[in-house]
Image (cartoon, grey):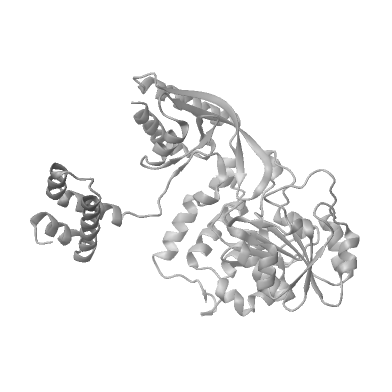
Amino acid sequence: MRSDAISSLAASSGHHTVVDAVRVVLARLRREIISGLLDENSLALGLTGLAVAVEGQLRQSLKYSLRSVINATGVILHTNLGRAPLSDEAMAHIRETATRYSNLELDLAKGARGKRDVHVDRLFQRLLCEEGKSAEQAPVSTIVVNNNAAAVLLALNTIADGGEVVVSRGELVEIGGSFRIPDVMAKSGATLREVGTTNRTRIADYERAITEQTRLLLRVHRSNFEITGFTEQPSTAELATLACKRAIPLMEDLGSGALFDLRSIGIGGEPGVLDSLQSGVDIVTYSGDKLLGGPQAGLISGGAGLIARMRSNSLFRALRVDKLIYAALEATLLAYVQRNHDGIPALRLMRLTKEEIGRRAEALAARIASSNASSKMKVEIADGESLLGGGAAPSSVLPTRLLAVTCEGVSADELATRLRGSEPPIIVRVEDGRVLLDLRTVFATDDTAVENALATLAR
């Protein structure tokens, strides 16, 4: 620590962080000595290079672990890669409200304490009212918690604690992270009442299961798998009619939850939030960072009376979100209100055509070929399919054009590893011995980075 090189590092980076780096480097050197990996020359080099090694270790330890990457997988809502990217407007609104004080819980008109929900509830009311009706005529309210699992937990605990919840056996789903509907129901204090079979459940099954202990009918959208063949399932409207007849609320866990018509991009069978509410569902739960294209959040929309009960549940405070989420969500919802779907990155990527992606892929392949001095790397254009991801429409795909890359003497897996090690890291798919890059999920501003990484590997 007293040597000139190390002490200068301590002056710029802090004494304690440099001490930690020195200890790591010395421990590594000791392990190499004990294992017999170093001869006298190697040991001498190791000792003379200690300052350089410490500086490298210091850089590594002070780097951010959470980093931006280039998503070339073609999976738009990739859970491992952070799902929906936020818009520039959302980031600007976050910066504006996070770096200064804000009116998060202050009613500026009255000069009194307010509710943080109002900043987005007003926008949800506009987006979720039926065509031809005003928000006042269709009193739908929305609250925000930290993710959809929390939304399901809060709704079940508020409505069905101590009672029974009727749900089809074919809808007892598990999503990522081993989140299972039966488990969260047990945590909520509600009792699961299964009806029907895995592949066939009829409206009569629900009706026979209703008792004095029934507090809720629950429909869970099978967003990450499909049951095909000999199947049967009552429509949402049928369930809503039964729920109304027996004076029991109907709740639907949509999971992804779209606020725009997916049929406009050729994807059917994925109900939107407004579809569910118009079918008579009393409470809908869904995610903020999936098909909605905003920040991670759990959203609960439904009748104002039921939402008010959830807001007064003490569990709501434990699950609520902060000003950063409200800022990002408000900016995202404003884009919907303005019908600026291309202003939401995830939606813009969904709306790209195969031809648009193909033109970019061909231009990129041509530039890589012109800069490739050797013939070892081969870049071809191939037809392919992009996925929505995020547990949404598992059998639906979007047509795309792919860059298919092979390199003589280097396996596809090794090539993918080297691309992950580039700066910034590039995440790709490997299929049939080829590395596949889908530019649907690569922002146009990152094309040059992809080109440079591939050109470097080619050389």
| Residue 245 falls in image quadrant | bottom right
Q: Residue at horizontal 88%, vertical 57%?
A: 202
> Residue 77, can we see it?
yes
> Residue 308, can we see it?
no
Closer to the camera, 339 or 413?
413
| Residue 313 falls in image quadrant | bottom right
Q: Quadrant of the N terminus?
A: bottom left
Looking at the picture, how far across and down is residue 348, in whole percent? 57, 42
| Residue 133 falls in image quadrant | bottom right
Q: Residue at horizontal 75%, vertical 54%?
A: 275
How many numbered marks, from 0 up?
0
Q: Residue at horizontal 45%, vertical 60%?
A: 94
| 128 versus 265 height, above or below | below
Looking at the picture, how far across and down is residue 294, in whole percent? 55, 55
Closer to the camera, 217 or 47?
47
Q: In the figure, is residue 418 to the left or right of 310?
A: left
Q: Quadrant of the C terminus?
A: top left
Q: Residue at horizontal 84%, vertical 57%?
A: 237
Closer to the camera, 133 or 381?
381
Closer to the camera, 450 or 93?
450
| 165 versus 168 height, above or below | below
